[in-house]
Image: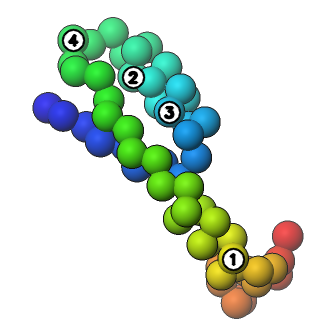
Amino acid sequence: MNLLCLHTAASNIAIFDDAAASLATTARPLNHLVMPDWLAEAERRHDGRTARPDRPAD
């Protein structure tokens, strides 16, 4: 099985690789795709608003 992990930050790659390595399986390594522009766009759209209008902002 081939697994692709989609990330918005490259720093998440090591976290997922470490977790996969701890499983002690013979599965193939994870493949990673980093899309930092998705995070930037979400932050731009969020602009201080909550994801759910019925909940106050943090």
- Secondary structure beneath dot 3 equals helix
| Label 1 sits on residue | 44
Residue 53 or 16: which is nearer the viewer? 16
Q: Is residue 6 left or right of residue 42?
A: left
User: The residue under label 3 is which amino acid type?
Assistant: Ile
- Identified at 22% across, 21% down, the residue is 28
Q: Quadrant of the N terminus?
A: top left
Q: What's the distance in space between the residues labelled 1 and 3, CA to CA? A: 23 Å
Q: Earlier in the sequence, mark 3 or mark 4?
A: 3
The crowd level at tag 3 (other Cα within 10 Å; few <14, some 14-19, many 20+) is some
Residue 50 pos. (x, y %): 73, 80
Q: Quadrant of the C terminus?
A: bottom right
- Secondary structure beneath dot 1 equals helix
The crowd level at tag 1 (other Cα within 10 Å; few <14, some 14-19, many 20+) is few
| Label 4 sits on residue | 26
- Extreme bottom residue here? 53
Residue 2 pos. (x, y %): 18, 34
Q: What's the distance in space between the residues labelled 4 and 1, CA to CA? A: 41 Å
